[in-house]
Image (cartoon, rainbow, N blue to C red):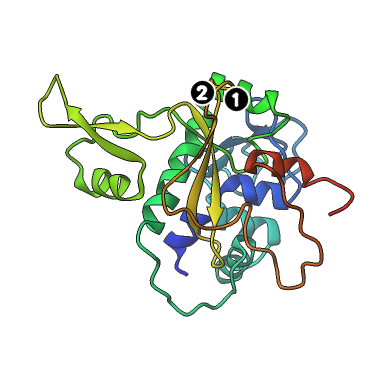
Amino acid sequence: MNIAEIKQQLTLSAVLQHYGLKPDKHLRLHCPFHDDKTPSLQVYYKTHTCYCFSSNCKTHGKALDVIDFVMHKESCSKHEAIQKCKQLIGGPVYQTYVPSPPGISILGNMFIYFRNAVHHSKPAQEYIRSRGLDATVLEIGYNTAQFHHGNRKDASLIGPCVEVGLLSPWGTNTREGGQAYKPFAKYCIVFALRDSSNQVSGLYFRSTINDDEQKHFYLKDRRGLYPGYPKPDTQRLILTEAIIDAPHYYSSPLL
């Protein structure tokens, strides 16, 4: 697992959760890297980076990615921080390369896009809160169905999205001509299903606007578990009716 793969799979939200840090409603934190009396560390979920605006901080002047954050929090070398990040992702520290099944890469990239969309959508945030969930702690995305707009000629996006079922050919584009596409699961919040290597191998969608008809959606050929495969020493498993019900059990005294 290289640095690019770590940054793709490990979110800043997961790192903050690991260290018991929760940003306020303005996505600010009391900086853990200096004596901070007022929140001066700004969190940017869209880029999975953060920045301390205090000149008293040793990190001032540099945006921190997930590896940098762990390195400063653990007061360790970058190599040690990389190993720690691999552990946070859930995979073994040293891995033998195994080719991913078709569609794995696009699903992981799209889930990052969907997660970033939550921070720009008040309807998504309101719906998530109405379900008793916290998008700053949980990995939740939102599908506005706009991801392909402006990219209709980008074969590296359109083709893989059609292959996994996120897009379907749908008539002709009336403005520009050429193929038009219908997005899957519009206005749904999104949860990732993960395989035994902790890669995103499927997506589950729950409608935010429809409670009367179909409201649960899965991509074709779905596989994987939410929130991930259990560890070998797991002694108790809890099955829920729907994936959206599962996060409510994270803080259960039974776990």
Residue behind mark 1: 125
Q: Is residue 227 above or below residue 42?
A: below
Q: Which mark is residue 213?
A: none
Cβ–Cβ under 8 Å for marks 1 and 2? yes
Q: Is residue 62 at all visible to an observer of this figure? A: no
Name the image quarter holding the C terminus. bottom right
Report the front residue among 11 and 124. 124
Q: Position of residue 65 (x, y in %)?
A: 52, 50
- In the figure, is residue 174 to the left or right of 222? left
Q: Is residue 3 above or below residue 186?
A: below
Residue behind mark 2: 121
Q: Amino acid at mark 1?
A: Gln
Q: Residue furthest left?
A: 177
Q: Amino acid at mark 2?
A: Ser
Report the front residue among 211 and 3. 211
Q: Position of residue 189 (x, y in %)?
A: 54, 33
- In the figure, is residue 196 to the left or right of 233? left
Mark 1–mark 2 distance (CA, rounded to whole Å): 6 Å
Q: Secondary structure at mark 1?
A: helix
Report the front residue among 57 and 68. 68
- In the figure, is residue 234 to the left or right of 75? right
Report the front residue among 152 and 206. 206
Image quarter of residue 78: bottom right
Image quarter of residue 87: bottom right
Q: Residue at x 85, y 46 (%)?
A: 252
Q: Position of residue 144 (x, y in %)?
A: 43, 27
Q: Position of residue 122 (x, y in %)?
A: 55, 19
Q: Residue at x 28, y 38 (%)?
A: 168
Density class for disc 2 (Cα within 10 Å; few <14, some 14-19, many ≥20) is few
Q: Is residue 160 at all visible to an observer of this figure? A: yes
Q: Secondary structure at mark 2?
A: loop
